[in-house]
């Protein structure tokens, strides 16, 4: 016999209530499981529609609803009719008797951005629009702000959350490469019953196991994403190739001139390649952080070496550390460590007009972009899209890298 799956909806007013609901209704597993006996009822919410879940037996699929922009698409893929006996006997994973939605979108404690103990703490329900416009994120994690600004449309950016982007774990999720280069950590909580809340912090690197699959355990809710604050950021190169290429650079108003003092500083680069200018998911995206050390300048035409701190500043720099992730081309977000190694130690310079001496670095840049393609293939294997993606990754990577290196010229132009 076929019948419609029951839909139950709950909008908890606190994190405790949400965790209890997850625990009691579904054993916390956002997936399929066999329910038996009484599981009580979902509490009705004060606000929002509320379809009470009936106690009983059967298979239930539990969904956490944050902004709902991925979830509503996902829910449409769950057949609303089922035949339990038939489904079980056939091992059909795509049917269930109950759908329970736990809507956490009203939990204000899971929203907002602040700095604490050297980390930017971003609540899981913080929207892309909030991240894009946050002064804290723009200053200390500019690649993340740039990635958030490229997501979907204004409507999607105002509803979609960082927690949803991370937990949905799509290979094309734009925040994942940006978070992985910053060594982001994820704070997860779950109720163990009797009011006891268990908390763990896991690195984003390793959180996503495979496309749309994470290590999140039954009953867990992501409460915040934590991004360590690094040293001074001098600027961001930001390129979006969505139909047409738009490249823009932003410089931070730093208190000191790093090139003049010889202090290391960070440069950031972000590029997204999509098919069109709006509502375009990534074909590839590049997140890049470079720690730059100013080194003594080369000799100008006068024959005098330009020392660090001299008027006009050094015109030579060294990449001390490179952090690279390329999104939408691997099943899960990874750092491109071999490419990072190739770039570490690269010395680059500018001529007296402040132009990057490209001839000096182009060989190493080509080696690095080829390595990036090799790393992509070693993670993803050869696929139908590989020939196109190889060219796309090389082109986007080289564009972002060169655009970012050029920013160093700005370090002595205070
Ligand atoms: C038209 C359109 C365009 C889009 N464009 C882009 C794009 O350009 N780039 C991009 O990256 N994405 C894009 N997306 C996807 C989506 O908007 C983002 O991934 C968004 O960040 C998802 O957040 P959400 O709050 O809506 O998540 P939801 O849909 O509410 O949830 C997504 C998943 O994460 C789980 N989840 C959510 N929050 C938590 C939590 N705190 N703890 C545990 N589990 C949780 C949910 O159970 C669900 O499985 C687009 C979507 C649409 C519909």
Image (spheres, rainbow, N blue to C red):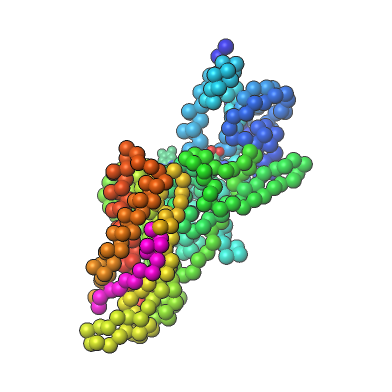
In the image, taking residue 233 as reference, residue 119 lies left or right, namely: right
Give x and y (percent) for residue 305: 30, 85
Q: Which residue lies furthest to the right in this view?
A: 194
Task: Determine if the magenta segment contains residue 283.
Answer: no
Query: In the visual, does 285 lie left or right of 96?
Result: left
Count the numbered circles shown: 0
What residue lies at 24% left-to-right and 87% top-to-bottom?
Answer: 303
Viewer-nearest residue: 1 or 53: 1
Q: Which residue is drawn at 52% across and 43% down?
A: 209
Instruction: Look at 52% across and 40% down and name the residue there.
Output: 213
Toward the top, the furthest residue is 1
Q: Measured from the top left, where is residue 14 in percent x and y? A: 67, 44
- Would you identify the image quadrant in which residue 41 lies? top right
| Location of residue 281 in the rendering, given as x and y in whole percent from the top left corner | 38, 43
Q: Give the range drawn in magenta.
A: 339-352
Left or right of 145 in this view: 283: left
- Is residue 293 in view from this perspective? yes
Q: Which of 310 and 332 is in front in this view?
A: 332
Residue 347 falls within the magenta-colored stretch: yes
Foreground pick, 229 / 218: 218
Answer above or below: position of 83 versus 59. Answer: above
Q: Name the image quarter holding the C terminus.
A: bottom left
Where, quadrant-wise, is the N terminus in this rendering? top right
Does residue 272 show up? Answer: no
Q: Quadrant of residue 40?
A: top right
Could you tell me residue 257's position as x and y percent?
41, 77
> Residue at (67%, 50%) from the top-left corner?
199
Residue 335 to residue 118: above or below: above
């Amino acid at each position: 016999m076929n019948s419609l799956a029951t839909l139950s909806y709950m909008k908890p007013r606190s994190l405790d209530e949400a965790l209890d609901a997850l625990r009691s209704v579904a054993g916390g597993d956002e997936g399929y499981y066999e329910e038996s006996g009484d599981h009580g009822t979902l509490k009705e919410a004060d606000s929002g529609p509320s379809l009470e879940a009936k106690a009983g037996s059967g298979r239930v699929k539990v969904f956490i609803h944050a902004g709902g922009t991925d979830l509503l698409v996902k829910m449409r893929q769950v057949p609303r009719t089922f035949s339990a006996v038939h489904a079980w006997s056939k091992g059909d994973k795509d049917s269930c008797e109950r759908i329970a939605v736990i809507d956490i979108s009203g939990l204000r404690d899971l929203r907002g951005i602040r700095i604490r103990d050297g980390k930017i703490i971003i609540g899981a329900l913080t929207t892309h629009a909030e991240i894009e416009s946050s002064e804290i994120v723009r200053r200390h994690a500019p690649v993340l702000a740039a990635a958030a600004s490229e997501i979907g449309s204004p409507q999607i950016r105002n509803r979609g959350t960082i927690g949803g982007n991370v937990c949905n774990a799509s290979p094309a999720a734009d925040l994942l490469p940006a978070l992985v280069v910053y060594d982001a950590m994820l704070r997860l909580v779950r109720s163990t019953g009797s009011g006891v809340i268990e908390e763990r912090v896991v690195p984003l690197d390793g959180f996503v196991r495979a496309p749309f699959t994470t290590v999140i355990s039954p009953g867990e809710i992501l409460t915040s994403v934590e991004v360590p604050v690094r040293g001074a950021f001098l600027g961001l190169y930001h390129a979006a190739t969505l139909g047409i290429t738009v490249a823009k650079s932003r410089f931070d108003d730093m208190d000191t001139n790093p090139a003049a003092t010889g202090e290391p500083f960070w440069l950031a680069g972000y590029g997204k390649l999509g098919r069109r200018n709006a509502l375009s998911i990534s074909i590839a995206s590049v997140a890049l952080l470079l720690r730059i050390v100013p080194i003594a300048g080369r000799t100008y035409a006068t024959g005098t070496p330009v020392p660090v701190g001299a008027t006009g500043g050094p015109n030579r720099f060294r990449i001390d550390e490179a952090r690279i992730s390329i999104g939408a081309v691997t099943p899960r977000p990874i750092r491109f460590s071999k490419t990072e190694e190739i770039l570490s130690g690269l010395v680059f310079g500018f001529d007296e007009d402040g132009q990057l001496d490209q001839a000096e670095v182009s060989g190493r840049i080509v080696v690095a972009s080829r390595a990036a393609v090799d790393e992509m293939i070693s993670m993803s294997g050869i696929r139908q899209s590989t020939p196109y993606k190889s060219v796309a990754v090389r082109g986007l990577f080289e564009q972002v890298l060169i655009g970012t290196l050029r920013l160093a010229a700005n370090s002595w132009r205070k």
